[in-house]
Image (cartoon, rainbow, N blue to C red):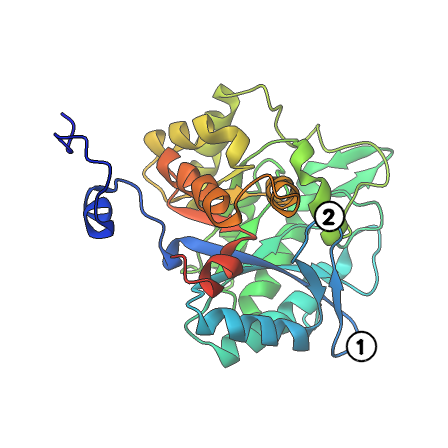
Amino acid sequence: MNFYRGRRLRSSAAMRSLVRETVLTKESLVMPYFVSDTDEPDFCRPISAMPGIDQCSLETLEKKVAAAVANGLAACILFGLPKNKDATGSEAWAADGIVQRAVRLLKKRWPDLLVITDVCLCEYTSHGHCGLVRDGIILNDPTLELLAKVALSHAAAGADIVAPSDMMDGRVLALRKALDDAGYAGLPIMSYAVKYASSFYGPFREAAESAPQFGDRKTYQMDPANRREALREAAADAAEGADFLIVKPAGPYLDVIREVADAFDLPVVAYQVSGEYSMLMAAIQNGWLDKERAVLESLVSIKRAGADIIITYFAEYLLAEGLI
């Protein structure tokens, strides 16, 4: 039945809001930040492929987050850029590592801000892969021990949620056991449960300086052609103790978001990744798309597909412009 019987050309904003089925809220958005371990307090390096997004120092991060929180930011996720990289990514679990210091800073300044930390090794390893490597092979099980150390260091710093993005088999169970044994049984795990080997990650690898130095990540990330595999991966992580399930990327995988949302009684998180952001920004800067309408439509489609939470580089923009 058509709500507007007379097919009126106009309807009030209040009426449209009353019957709107899908609504974006401030609380449903997570803003990513790239924080660099630098001695330059005013460091702010623009990411060429992601207009409006920067690598930033702790001091610059604090200023950015202050403005975003004032506009209503409820949650952020942190990615670290260390001073030094090595074969094991040892700075990832250093007590005074860049993410650990950033967590302490943000939680001290804004106790109610939800601070999520990315748990992976690719930003910290000299080879750029998400796990230990021997003779060109990713070592799954030995990597789990290191990921657990990373998660524990983030928990000790005060992170509200840890988010393993490595896609090693069994890593949720390894993190859950390590956290429980160390007294962090209440710390949630937001698992990158469904992470495709996507071409849309290109700009992120510039932002996080995490491009693989050889090969690719297809042996541990998912084939974009596979749908049923997504449900198996999500089921495995849910069984191991995941509290949230991430689907990444978001826009090209709306069907997968819907299937995961229908199949699991856990919050579903969709990551609108760097390539999605860059494509929209390129079209916007060329005058081919209206920014407000295009950004909102892209995010509403993700929410409509079944996402409860959206990680998006547009979070600051939407809040600053008062669009949600």
Residue that numbered label 1 is attached to:
39
Residue 199 in the image, given as x and y percentages of width and height: 69, 32
Query: As rendered, which of 185 and 91 lies closer to the eye?
Result: 91
Q: Is residue 273 left or right of residue 237?
A: right
Residue that numbered label 2 is attached to:
49
Quarter that holds the N terminus: top left
Nearest-to-viewer mark from 2 and 1: 2
Residue 238 in the image, given as x and y percentages of width and height: 42, 38
Q: Is residue 208 visible?
A: no
Quarter that holds the C terminus: bottom left
Can you tell which quarter of the image residue 280 is in?
top right
Q: Is residue 266 above or below residue 183?
A: above
Which residue type does callout 1 highlight? Asp
Q: Residue at x 52, y 23 (%)?
A: 229
Q: Secondary structure at mark 2?
A: loop
Q: Is residue 97 visible?
A: yes
Can you tell which quarter of the image residue 3 is in?
top left
